[in-house]
Image (tube, rainbow, N blue to C red):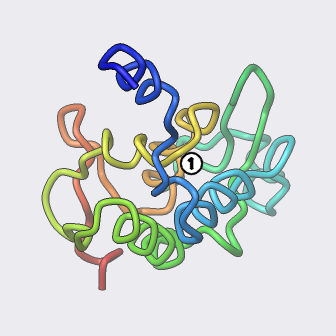
Amino acid sequence: MDTDEKMTGDLFEVDKRLSLKPVVDFNAYLRSAFGDGLCTCIRCIASKGDESGYAYQHNFTFDGKPAHRRFASTAGSDVLAMLKKAWLSYAKAELPLSGVLVLDTVKAFVEPQLHNRIAPLFLASGLVKDLEGQLHMQPQAAA
C-alpha cells in the first residue's frame, strides 16, 4: 500500500471511541431528553406558555418543531452522570467539574444532528450556566 492509499483510507476510518457503550448511551439519552410538542406541566398550562418567571426553560424549538424537556429524566444530576460516563470513555479523562465546559469535546462524541440539543439540555438542567457566551459547570449540579 503506498502513501496515497494510506492517507485515503485514514479519511474514511471512523473513530472507534464513538461506538463505546457510554458514548452511544449518551447520544440515546440526548435524543430522548426532549419530548415532542410544548410542555404540559401545570405551570406552563397556567401561564399559557409564558416562561418569563422560570429559572429553567421548559420549551424549545429544534428543527422548526416545538419540544419540551422531560423533567423526570433530565435533572442536573442525571445529565451529569450520563455526561461523565461518556466523557471518560471518549476523552480517557475525568470530566472537569468546575470552570468552562469544553463544548467541542462533547460535540466530538455527539451525533451532529443532536448538537443543537446539547447546550439547551445542559442549561435547562442547571448543569451549566452561560457566562459571557461560555458554559460554566455549576458546583451544585456536580455535587
Residue 24, position as x, y percentages in the image: 62, 61
Q: Give the labeled residue for mark 1.
A: 57
| Residue 83 lies in quadrant | bottom left
**SS of the residue under disc 1:** loop
For this orientation, the residue located farthest to the bottom is: 143
How many discs appear? 1
Residue 133, position as x, y percentages in the image: 24, 32
- Which residue sits at x=52%, y=28%? 12
Compared to residue 27, the image places residue 79 above or below, namely below
For this orientation, the residue located farthest to the top is: 4
Q: Amino acid at mark 1?
A: Gln
- Which residue sits at x=72%, y=62%? 70
Describe residue 35's horizontal placement relative to residue 55 as left or right. right
Foreground pick, 43 / 29: 29
Residue 53, position as x, y percentages in the image: 52, 49
- Which residue sits at x=37%, y=26%? 6
Foreground pick, 17 / 68: 17
| Residue 80 lies in quadrant | bottom left
Compared to residue 93, the image places residue 106 above or below, namely above
Quadrant of the rendering where the C terminus is positioned: bottom left
